[in-house]
Amino acid sequence: MTGAQILIECLKREGVEVIFGYPGGQVLPIFDKLYDAGLKFILTRHEQGAAHAADGYARATGKTGVCLATSGPGATNLATGIANAYMDSIPLVAITGQVKSFLIGNDAFQEADITGITRPITKHNYLVKDVKDLARIVREAFYIASSGRPGPVVIDIPSDIQMQDTEFIWPETVDIRSYKPTYYGHPGQIKKAAKLIAQAKKPILYIGGGIITSGASFVLRELAEKIQAPVTWTLMGIGAFPATHKLSLGMLGMHGTGYANHAIMEADIIIAVGARFDDRVTGRIDTFAPGAKVIHIDIDPASISKNIKVDVPIVGDARNIIGELLEQLKKAPDTSEWLKIAEGLKRKYPLKYKDDGKIKPQYVVEQLYEVTKGNAIITTEVGQNQMWAAQWYKYDHPRTFISSGGLGTMGFGFPAAMGAKIGCPDKTVIDIAGDGSIQMNIQELATCVCNKINVKVAILNNGYLGMVRQWQELFYKKRYSQVCITSPDFVKLAESYGAEGIRVAKKEDVRPAIEKALAIDNTVFIDFSVEPEENVYPMVPAGEAINRMIEGLA
Amino acid sequence: MRHTISVLVENKFGVLARIAGLFSARGYNIASLAVSETLEPGTSYMTIVVEAEDEKVLEQVKKQLNKLIDVITVTDFTKKEHVERELILLKINYSAKDKARLDNIINKYVSKIIQHKGDTAILEAIGDQHQIRGLLEDLKPFGIKELVRTGRIAIAY
Ligand SMILES: Cc1ncc(C[n+]2csc(CCOP(=O)(O)OP(=O)(O)O)c2C)c(N)n1
């Protein structure tokens, strides 16, 4: 078989259903073999769209996403998408073409050192120098991408290698001696944690994306109910615990709920699972949860004690460890007083906005929730839209909230929605977008229409790069420097691509517009003219303690 | 504080760049780096000396090193009983009348004159950092024209 055939055979054996990508000179041998390979290929309009779509597909399905691009500019266009997947620990395999082996390093046409460029933003990467290594490398790449703490892996394949012939040998097993992720927690540490929890008076569960990755939602819920501890989460942890559950405290952090931020400061034990104490969550680190002992469960030892001191570190897979913990927990703590306090905090610091006659972005998100009854997959762009999507839609299931957490990539939501819809065709998929962000990968409208990918884009159109404007308002004396952004007529633009558009200028039209959009069997842009200077509250100013929130005017 | 760390890795291209990248991404300068094959074909040993004020950051670097797919083991010698050595080659001014004085110094250390030609001698010396520093101090009066060092290597008990 040729290298290209081997690659495709390997992808099939890895169970790949869809590849997102874009062709070019240095991947022509692969595209030639794709012609009759029977694999679904989605031709995006930009390689960044391909990477984000593969990422969105992975987040929605739990499978590994695959994208493919040519050498040089094709590969560099993937870089943002790869970095995005890296920061959020998303399993992704990115395949890039490379100039012919003997030209590498010669500044050949469309050459870029993509293994060099992606080294700091991948879990691992490969340059294939011998076609005999290809099958093993592809197998390893999928294994590395999806195991342990998942992440993106790049395979860079020179075009001459794609054409060379060799015998195809499928490696049945993968054995990388230096890579052995730890899946089971240390029994002694788990025992210690169980003991600590049994004595807790004010325990709190603080959970992140790791719960979703490990499929631990169900056992987590069991744990929370058994020890009667309130649960708060990171942006990446949204959906890992039902938001409508009575123990739920909502999101923590800079734009988290007031009650979560206050509660964690009062906790005596924090049980952190699959979350990494990002600065957006802890606020000023030396003031964070002063009275709390910390149990930290994570598959990545480097995540533990990175930002805060941990009393009981447990390295391993969240589902296994929580399962063990449940077995060890003989006696549940009495937290009735604590739950009363938490209830009080909920009443004292509710999420709120002033609902006047105008279209408030929060109202739009609430209506999206009402109309979909919480049964949609929501993706987001980055900025205020993302925070409102996190605050005002209630997510009860994992993999229903898809957002760029670590890198904060504008332009992520729309292609990610595309990928999610392909992975979950029976689900309603809505990208909650800003007028700025949507313009970063708007060209993917063509991809949607051409492939009949039915996603909805709810544009919270405030005429500003809203989140930046909010910071300028609050911290730069309203000196609105370069944040007023003009947009095309989104309705006409959608129509010109063959999609549909709905403009909403009045509050009473919000709900009917959403209902109408959902009924249309096509991609729809809904352009909501929202209050231009609405802010996201509460807000913890950068570098402040997490319970020192600006509450806003409402 | 200077830390000596050794990393056992798969001997593949790009590994050195990945490792160096972990230090440079945090603004750490690598003070010395020595790389060579081990007894086992396909693996290399890297001994890295790094200047790090912040122990916590260094801890993080070590964990990140451990995470790299091609890294087999990471050893931090800071709190371990170990021996360190470095080889240096240097050119100094030489004249026959200084020979006795020079021999005296050289004999104090693990060092010898490899060659002398005209007014220049080439010396080699092996030692830990104190010995190397001592030797360089003692040789200063002769005038050191050129110096190359291998960088530190270390082995634990
Ligand atoms: C690629 C990229 N460039 C710049 C930023 C910085 N940034 C963060 S939020 C934001 C404004 C987003 O504006 P918009 O999409 O209109 O959303 P809004 O905040 O108004 O909801 C910007 C520019 C970013 N996150 N990503």
Image (cartoon, rainbow, N blue to C red):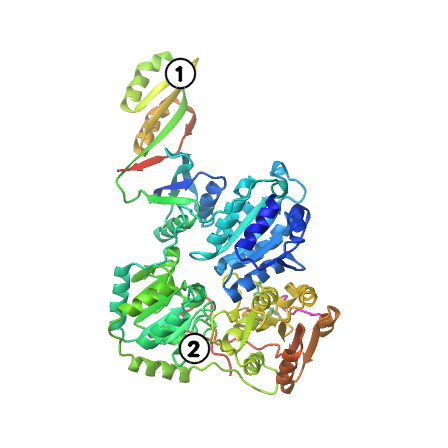
Kindly identify which chain the residue marked by label 2 belongs to: A
Disc assigned to residue B115: 1
Disc 2 element:
helix
Image quadrant assignment for residue A370: bottom right
Q: Is mark 2 within 8 Å of ligand 1?
A: no
Position of residue A531 measured from the top left corner of the image (x, y, whole percent)? 61, 79
Disc 1 element:
strand
A322 on left or right of A413:
left
Q: Nearer the viewer, residue B79 or A322?
A: A322
Circle 1 Cα neighbour tier, 10 Å, few/some/many (<14 / 14–19 / ≥20): few
Image quadrant assignment for residue A250: bottom left
> Is residue A301 depicted above or below B125 in this figure?
below
Position of residue A323 measured from the top left corner of the image (x, y, whole percent)? 33, 67
Residue type at mark 1? Gln
Magenta stretch contains residue A511: no
Residue carrying label 2: A258
Position of residue B55 measured from the top left corner of the image (x, y, whole percent)? 34, 51
Please state the extent of the stretch shown in magenta in the rendering. A482-488
Magenta stretch contains residue A485: yes
Kindly identify which chain the residue marked by label 1 belongs to: B
Q: Which quadrant does the N terminus of chain A fall into?
A: top right
Q: Using the rendered image, report if marks 2 and 1 lie on a common chain.
A: no
Q: Nearer the viewer, residue B30 or A9?
A: A9
